[in-house]
Image (cartoon, grey):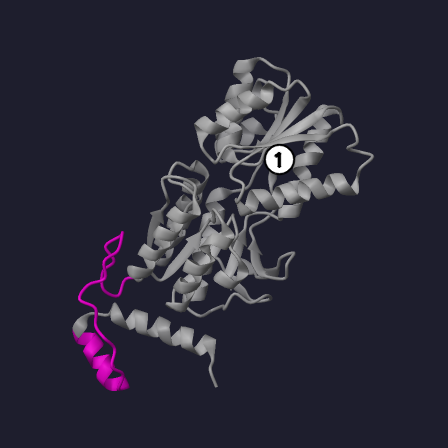
Amino acid sequence: MYNLEEETLMKKYIKKLISIPPILAISISLLTACSVPQSESTPSPSEKSANETVYAFVGKDIQNPYNQKVFEGFETACNEIGIEAVYKAPTSATADKQIEIINELIDNNVDGIAISANDADALESSLTEALNSGIEVISVDAPVNSISRKTHIQQADPEVLGRNFIKSAYDVSNGEGGFAILTSTGSAPNQNQWIRYLKLEIEENPKKYSNMPLIEIAYGDDDATKSYTETQYLLQNDAIKTIIVPTTIGLSSAAKALKESGKDVNLIGLGFPSELSEYIKDGTCDRLYIWNTTDLGYLTAYTLKALDENEITGSIGETFTAGSLGEKTITADKDNASEIILGDPIMFDRTNIDSLSDIY
């Protein structure tokens, strides 16, 4: 009977065997009576050498500081494990460019891929091909479809974060005035999840938010310049009293534009205290949310290790040890697919920005 799991394990075995030095590979091949074609070399963006394990982190775009911080933790964990870490990201936040990178990583025979998706549907085919090639595939931060990965590393419960955005907007505006959202791209899975739960919070509490209509959703495409100009455009509308920005690049740009405008508009979103401390202190930005991004990358690398070494399969209920983060359990997300949650988001305002801005 056909068994997909057994076939995947065999492909992983063959992939590992190909990277073993030639003399040893011949010996193993004779002992196992297997005829495995030997590659002349294994080209890689990291110049993968024989018998070397390589995990790749694929970010949304090369200028994204959030993804770069996640990779710092990813690389730290890989160094602990004794594995080479590779960072790849497109020049623009598009799925097409990420697909090119995935195909390159498949050709280069990497052992694991962790990706922050620009478009879950568009990436499905290439990531499924990677899985079928024996590569461990997981998503982090921005999920891919469950069929095209083993599990997802969730930075925080998306429902909690989405609802907190609009609850904070209510608090800082006293529930008065319209609001706008400045997000990244229209296809960004994580931002779209948060916005969906933000809207659900409003739908479930219509009386509370009756004086806070959503006026517009603008797209900065995770580009600092475009996010800045989109904020300038939103600020021209006097009906907008609060701007919610669920993207780190967008929030930094929005804070800059808002401060320069001198307008009395509330601003909250997703951002780094180290980058936005000045804007929090002078009142430009009211609140921001974030989690330990380096821990997120660290957890991601240890999850790939657990999958690669067959400690887990990515199924709900499994547990493994993620280095200094301790034991982690795979749980079910809202669609009953598997995920691993790092923890709760942290809210920063004037009361705690100084104490933690040097960490985050």
The residue that disc 1 covers is: 347
Q: Main secondary structure of the magenta part?
A: loop
Q: Residue at x 39, y 60 (%)?
A: 112
Compared to 292, does 357 lie above or below?
above
Residue type, mark 1 in image: Met
Position in image of residue 221 (x %, y %): 48, 36
Q: Residue furthest top?
A: 262
Q: Quadrant of residue 192?
A: top right
Depth check: give the residue in front, 158 or 329.
Answer: 158
Position in image of residue 53 (x %, y %): 31, 61
Left or right of residue 199, residue 112 in this image: left
Span of residues in magenta: 23-52
Depth check: give the residue in front, 173 or 295.
Answer: 173
Q: Is residue 50 shown in magenta?
A: yes
Position in image of residue 7 (x %, y %): 41, 77
Q: Residue at x 47, y 53 (%)?
A: 122
Position in image of residue 67 (x %, y %): 44, 42
Q: Is residue 97 shown in magenta?
A: no
Left or right of residue 72, residue 21 in this image: left
